[in-house]
Image (cartoon, helix red, strand yellow):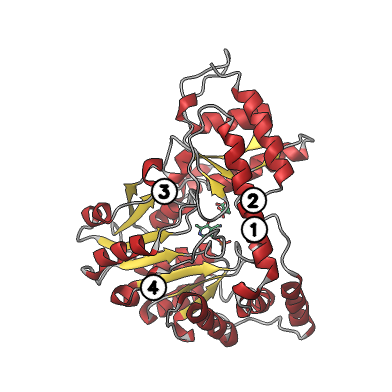
């Protein structure tokens, strides 16, 4: 059978660049190469012990049957309480829908709200999967750009200008993947002001890196009273609790959206894994401020960020900022475009990433995939030794580009 079987929708979809680079580096590793993967965004830590114990207990108590489609009531209630405890926002348990990762939660929302040609405003740099999710649901991504000179932050005026009568949603992500940028409360308030005037636009606030924050406090867009009824918070346990493989994320949204997500999920996937939900219950029920494991992980990420920024200072042509969250750096590397080692010429960030994978055996993700072709993404969710070795290999390889 050939590609003719595939739908136009599928053929026009891009492959996830983060997962693509990760699978390339796994292939090289399988062939025996010593590859350092700074491509995937996942904590290298193991899931904390009490969470694993909760999962084992769930198995022993035979919590192994189909869970309710939107999640177990006690887990939805724990999420509602977490939103109050950590974010000061009021959502009822009925407004929470648990899914197989935040990825599914975001896709669910788009399937629920978009008609053909409806627009979603997305600040770039953006996480690679957003435009594909919007496209698969029939919508159109309207990109507004932010560069390194504004710390990768968009201005309220840019958002205002992008709004049309087709705008259905605004997709926001702070702390941000791929830049690590964290908006301040003042900046968020200014964004909230824009949407006060547009109460029919849904604000989808992806807060998956909430706990991956180095200084200050995470502020949710839903915490501004004037827009609270138009915000859908996306969050989950993957990044904060080192639980990427458990696949639990959620949306907390206006009731009409939560009911719609429940309906979609009921036809597509049913409820998220029962054992993983019980593990997530243990994670979410603990106040992060009291969790030694969470503190240890954040402190480690902060040290690695500082180490990486220091090492990049010694590599010519890497322009970077100092982000306050997540576990990524997103340097501008356009200095290398047009340079060659005599055989290979680097024209863009894809070329540079492939060159570094091939010659230095370091896996990164090209900025093109995040809507910023002049940059590359470096994930520092790995050990200091690996980061140091990777930067030394990169420095040596890049010297050959003239
Ligand atoms: N949003 C952002 C910005 C992400 O980086 C990720 C990482 N995969 C997700 C959502 C989805 O996370 P998960 O599906 O693992 O919950
Ligand atoms: N969000 C992570 C990343 O950006 C995990 C991979 C993915 O789901 O795209 O690397």
Is the residue marked 2 within 8 Å of ligand 2, measured from its CB? no
The first of marks 3 and 4 along the sequence is 3
Instruction: Report helix, strand or loop for mark 4.
Output: helix
Q: Residue furthest top?
A: 342
Residue 162, image x, y percentages: 24, 53
Q: Which mark is residue 222?
A: 4
Q: CA distance from mark 3 to mark 4?
A: 37 Å
Mark 1 against mark 3, which lies toward the viewer?
A: 1
Instruction: Report helix, strand or loop for mark 2.
Output: helix
Which residue is tagged 2?
A: 303
In the picture shown, does residue 69 fall above or below 44?
Answer: below
Q: Relative to residue 60, is residue 123 drawn left or right? A: left
In the picture shown, does residue 61 fall above or below 53?
Answer: below
Q: CA distance from mark 4 to mark 1?
A: 27 Å
Which residue is tagged 3?
A: 8
Look at 49% across and 25% down and name the residue there. Answer: 336
Comparing 119 with 76, the one in front is: 76
Mark 4 against mark 1, which lies toward the viewer?
A: 1
Instruction: Report helix, strand or loop for mark 1.
Output: helix
CB contact under 8 Å: marks 2 and 3: no
The first of marks 1 and 3 along the sequence is 3
Ligand 1, image quadrant it occupies = bottom right
Comparing 252 with 375, the one in front is: 375
Look at 77% across and 81% down and name the residue there. Answer: 57
Residue 217, image x, y percentages: 49, 66
In the picture shown, does residue 315 fall above or below 3?
Answer: above
Mark 4 against mark 2, which lies toward the viewer?
A: 2
CB contact under 8 Å: marks 1 and 2: yes
Which residue is tagged 1?
A: 299
Mark 3 against mark 4, which lies toward the viewer?
A: 4
CB contact under 8 Å: marks 1 and 3: no
């Amino acid at each position: 059978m050939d590609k003719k079987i595939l739908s136009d929708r599928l053929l026009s979809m891009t492959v996830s660049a983060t997962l693509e680079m990760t699978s390339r580096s796994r292939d090289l590793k399988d062939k025996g190469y010593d590859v350092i993967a700074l491509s995937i965004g996942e904590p290298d830590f193991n899931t904390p012990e009490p969470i694993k114990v909760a999962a084992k207990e769930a198995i022993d108590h035979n919590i192994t049957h189909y869970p309710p489609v939107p999640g177990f009531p006690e887990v939805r209630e724990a999420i509602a309480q977490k939103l109050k405890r950590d974010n000061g926002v009021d959502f009822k348990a009925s407004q929470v829908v648990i899914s197989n990762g935040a990825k599914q939660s975001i896709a669910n929302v788009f399937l629920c709200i978009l008609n053909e040609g409806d627009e979603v405003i997305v600040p770039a740099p953006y996480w690679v999967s957003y435009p594909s999710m919007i496209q698969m649901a029939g919508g159109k991504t309207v990109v507004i750009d932010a560069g390194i000179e504004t710390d990768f932050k968009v201005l309220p005026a840019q958002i205002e200008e992008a709004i049309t009568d087709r705008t259905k949603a605004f997709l926001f992500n702070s702390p941000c993947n791929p830049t690590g940028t964290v908006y301040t409360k003042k900046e968020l308030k200014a964004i909230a002001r824009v949407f006060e005037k547009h109460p029919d636009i849904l604000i989808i606030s992806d807060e998956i890196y909430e706990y991956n924050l180095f200084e200050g406090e995470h502020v949710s867009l839903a915490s501004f009273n004037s827009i609270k009824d138009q915000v859908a918070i996306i969050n989950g346990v993957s990044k904060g609790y080192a639980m990427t493989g458990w696949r639990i994320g959620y949306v907390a949204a206006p009731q009409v959206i939560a009911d719609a997500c429940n309906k979609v999920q009921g036809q597509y996937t049913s409820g998220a894994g029962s054992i993983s939900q019980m593990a997530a219950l243990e994670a979410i029920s603990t106040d992060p401020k009291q969790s030694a494991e969470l503190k240890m992980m954040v402190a480690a990420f902060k040290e690695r960020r500082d180490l990486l920024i220091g090492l990049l200072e010694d590599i010519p042509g890497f322009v970077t900022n100092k982000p306050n969250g997540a576990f990524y750096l997103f340097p501008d590397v356009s200095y290398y475009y047009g340079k060659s080692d005599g055989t290979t010429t680097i024209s863009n960030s894809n070329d540079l990433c492939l060159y570094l994978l091939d010659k230095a055996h370091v896996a990164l993700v090209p900025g093109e995939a995040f809507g910023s072709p002049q940059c590359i993404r470096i994930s520092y969710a790995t050990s200091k030794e690996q980061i140091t070795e990777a930067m030394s290999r990169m420095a040596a390889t890049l010297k050959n580009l003239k």
